[in-house]
Image (tube, rainbow, N blue to C red):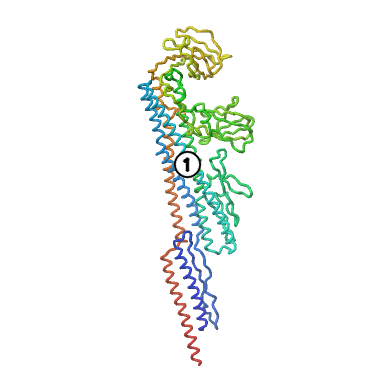
Amino acid sequence: MSLDLMNIARTGVLASQSQLAITSNNIANANTAGYNRQVVSQSALDSQRMGNDFYGAGTYVSDVKRVYNDYATRELRIGSTAVSESQTTFGKMSELDQLFSQIGKAVPQGLNDFFASMNALADIPNDLGLRGSMLTSANQLANSVNQMQSHLDSQMTQTNDQIAAVTDRINEISNELGSINRELMKSQGQDMQLLDKQDALILELSEYASVNVVPLESGAKSVMLGGSIMLVSGEMSMQMGTVQGDPYPNELQITAQSGNKSMIVDASKLGGQLGALVNYRDETLIPSQMELGQFALGVSDAFNQAQAQGFDLNGQVGANIFTDINDPSMQIGRVGALSSNTGTANLSVNIDDVGNLTGSSYELKFTAPSTYELKDAASGNITPLTLNGTKLEGADGFSINIDAGTLASGDTFEIRPTSGAASSISVEMTDPKGIAAAGSKITADAANTGNSQVSLVSIDDRTAANFPVTGSELTFEIDPAATPPTFEVFDAAGTSLGAAAPYTPPNISAHGFTFEIDSTATTAQKFTFDLSFAEGDNTNLVNMAKLNEAKLMNGGKTTLTDVFENTTVNVGSKTKSAEMSMGSAEAIYNQAYTRVQSVSGVNLDEEAANLMRFQQSYQASARIMTTANEIFNTLFSSLR
């Protein structure tokens, strides 16, 4: 019987020793990230029969396992994805908000200073010093727009670098998970330290993208990103990467390996940091750049057109102050051809009416034999375009030219009419005398159909016979529908100065000046010209200063300043929304984390109590061994 006591005590000591070891390990790893509490399952040994009775034979450790709740862990991963996505979005939006509110304030301030310099010059229009100040203000305005675009370009570069860094880390995790799976297959999923490391890596992975985990019987886990990309399959690790954007190279696209091929991934649906970065770039940063370009085009077009309505100090028609809206430098980036196109067409975009631009991007798709569809990326509206010669017409304020080659059915292009303008706008005028302060008077006849416009091109000779001045105005009767088109000139008394003469559209040159007519009228149109000039005249400059309050943009709904301010307000609104979303996501994540910790985390108070309990159990079992040994010795002594 003493021998049985010895065995029972030995099993008790060993079991208590195991309990103490696991408890000590729990305490030691109480602050280890990703550690799951371990517990010992202890069972009784089979009883032994002695005579008619059964006696217990002791205890043994039947299992050592992690305290793990798959459902709670899955909820934690979902919460981790959401909070990481919201934090990344808020971080990027905060950077952009600060950029617009701090550095960006120089843009509307520059425009205000430009208008202030106009008002000052309007008082003394022939003052060369004030004219120089106006050109200086124009340069400051252009530089502030250039600087703002440069900062937005830096945001683009930084965001792309972050996207590349995240994909690199995902690949590292993929390789580590493949190696862990290989080791777990050897132990049939019994190595708890490897299981903890596996869970920690998957939890980190869930920060970068949404994760779906598929447990395998071997103890390994397959991992999918976004529900569609198999990143880890057993011990096989897949890879992700980045390639140049299509059609715009500086907008990185994300790839995923599928067999021996790589496929483009719609990263906006991945969630986590990766999805947040791509969504920020595509839905906020790029639209902000295009809206800044819309502002730049508005400034350039408004003041260049105003210049063309007046005379400079030399009596000539005012030249451009800013870069022309259709200058080659301003057209960079307006068209992007997809690499999948099979046609040979080269396209360009010409701005026809800045006031009708929306600041949006479009998708142009050609379907044989003659269907051209333009889809607005913001609204989803599809507009059919009409091919007139080599020009596609019918878009919002712009037309698309087929400069060379031909389109094949299915060819697709991304059209960004305002792209590149903010980085290219500059002041072309260098001579202060070129500011057109004096005004010209061109009056359309009330009977005109309303779809005809004229604009001065040049003053060729103010000494020419019948040059129109106040009191000796000239009226041009133009018939654009005649074959060929003709014009006839009448003096102030209504007397014809000659028979109707043909002209080659769009320019007409006569009596010392040249003007351009844009008309689709089918009847004769009349315009009266008074091209008087005086150095002290400020008529055109006053009209130019009124552009400050003129609603020139977005179909006559907003001013130039409004275009920029609306972008600023939109960025601020998105930032506030992102902050609120982050707060909600963090609350949900904290709940999930608390739930996991309540199940799998180490409670030091509980472990301390266990430590004392198992210590006492160990001591009691050891005492049984001592008692058994004393009984055994007493028995031997009695037989001597």
Q: Residue at x 41, y 41 (%)?
A: 98
Above or below: residue 20 compared with residue 594: below
Q: Position of residue 492 (x, y in %)?
A: 45, 9
Q: Position of residue 473 (x, y in %)?
A: 44, 11
Q: Residues within 10 Å of mark 1 (few under 14, many from 20)?
A: some
Q: Residue at x 43, y 51 (%)?
A: 586
* Residue linked to disc 1: 155
The residue lying toward the viewer, choosing from 391 and 252, is 252
Q: Secondary structure at mark 1?
A: helix
Q: Dividing the picture into quarters, in which one does residue 469 lie?
A: top left
Q: Position of residue 637 (x, y in %)?
A: 49, 90
Q: Residue at x 48, y 70 (%)?
A: 19
Q: Does residue 517 appear in this view?
A: yes
Q: Position of residue 626 (x, y in %)?
A: 46, 82
Number of numbered discs present? 1
Above or below: residue 312 compared with residue 495: below
Q: Amino acid at mark 1?
A: Gln
Q: Does residue 381 appear in this view?
A: no
The residue lying toward the viewer, choosing from 517 and 209, is 517
